[in-house]
Amino acid sequence: MNYQNYKKCFSFKSNPYANGIPTRNIIDPKRSKKREVCYLCENGKITPNTRNHMSLQCPLCGKSKASEALFCESCSNKIRTNYEVELPNQSKREVEPIVSRQEVKPEIVEQIAAEPIYNSEKIDVNDNPEEKKPERSGEKRKKGKLLLRIVILLFVLTGAFLVYNETIRKSSLERIAWGKALEINTIGGYLDYMSSFPNSVHFADAQTLMRSLKEGETTEWQRIKTTNNPSDLRDFLHHYPETPYRSLVEIRLDSLSWIEALKANRVEAYSDYILQVEIGDFNGEYLSLAKSRYNMLFQSYPVNEADLEFIRRIVGEFFNSLSSLDGDGIRRHLAPVVNRFFETGRTSREQLIERLQTSTTYAQNGTIHFVVDASTVQYEKTMEDGFKVNIPITKIIEKDESTTTLPGFIVHMEIDSLFQIISVYETKPYPELR
């Protein structure tokens, strides 16, 4: 142990006789700080708790000493000679001498006596053992090397990423894009590939395939632009989704789809047309008409099977009589007064039958047959216990040995509580039809 600094022990800061006793820096375990401690306190001979209780034994060697003296005569001479410190003959009253309560162990005494008390070398009072400049400079060098290695590693990784991005990654992306362009096989697909990879080895191939598709697209459009088959138009859009003729194809497809719905003239056909508009197959020029006809023919009212069967029988017999101009059959199902009969206003039953049989209208337009599908009849009950009936009808006109079929008519009929027809009129597939 090397006690060489002439500083006051932190345990004896209030003891004026502790000045000049050799001390050294140790770490205080309670406060994790370095403290100046003399050899007496460190070896347990004197503690702050026992400094007010001094014994008659010398704290250094254990020999007898005077009660007023701090040390025995021999130890006092050594301190005066070696450290050039003047010790008072007796302690002051305000600071009582202190020693340890416990007996000094012989082995500790021998250890302190054998230990040199001073160091012949010059003592630097300002020397701070915490400052180790060589170690700090070494740590700085280590940190600098570590930082340099990190910078070099980042530089290498950046270079590797750039090389990968320029060679492997771009080559892989080009192969994937070319495979996708071949798979979809459209003009737009080849244009996207050519704009993304202008220096590609497949650039010329993409141009050739695009020209071939363009020529085939034009030829195909010339073939189908007057077709009446919606399937041909849908196939054309499937093969050429980005065609410049798309708007013309959709207009044609819209018209043909509406014509098909009118020919069927059923709830399911109008529902299909509405669905095609909603999913974007075409714009739907006839969407409002399709919704109106769907509502006319959709059976929303709860069905009474007995009423429905009776209504179907009345509708079927009446239109058969009207097709053949059978006066008795027409009279049997019409009410005495009819509020409306197609284009004719309120009139009596007898006047209406006479007009039908003597009118030249039918002779000019030809013979008209009404074709009724009784399974498609839709009805709802009125507040007067009557019925409002909607019937999809197809008209077949025979004139001059020619036959014309006109689908898409919906006849609206009102039947009173006695199951007599009081009103008949129609919704035409095209407003211009008479």
Image (tube, rainbow, N blue to C red):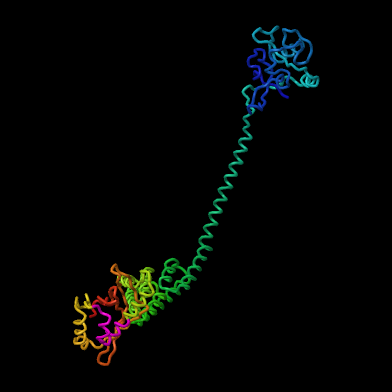
What main secondary structure does the magenta stretch of the protein show? helix
Across and down, in percent, residue 120 comes to 71, 20
Q: Is residue 31 left or right of residue 419?
A: right
Magenta region: 316-335
276 vs 392, nearest the viewer: 392
Q: Quadrant of residue 108?
A: top right
Residue at the far front in the pictured view: 418
Q: Say if residue 215 shows up in the picture.
A: no
Q: Quadrant of the C terminus?
A: bottom left
Work out whether residue 298 or residue 125 is closer to the camera in this orientation and state it.
298
Lateral position of residue 6 relative to residue 390, left or right: right
Q: Quadrant of the N terminus?
A: top right
Residue 343 falls left or right of residue 294: left
User: Can residue 95 be seen in the rendering of this structure?
Assistant: yes
Residue 360 sits in quarter: bottom left
Q: Is residue 363 above or below residue 378?
A: below
* Residue 177 located within the stretch drawn in magenta: no
Residue 422 on image: x %, y %? 25, 75
Instruction: Examine the rendered structure and indicate whether residue 195 appears above or below residue 406.
Output: above
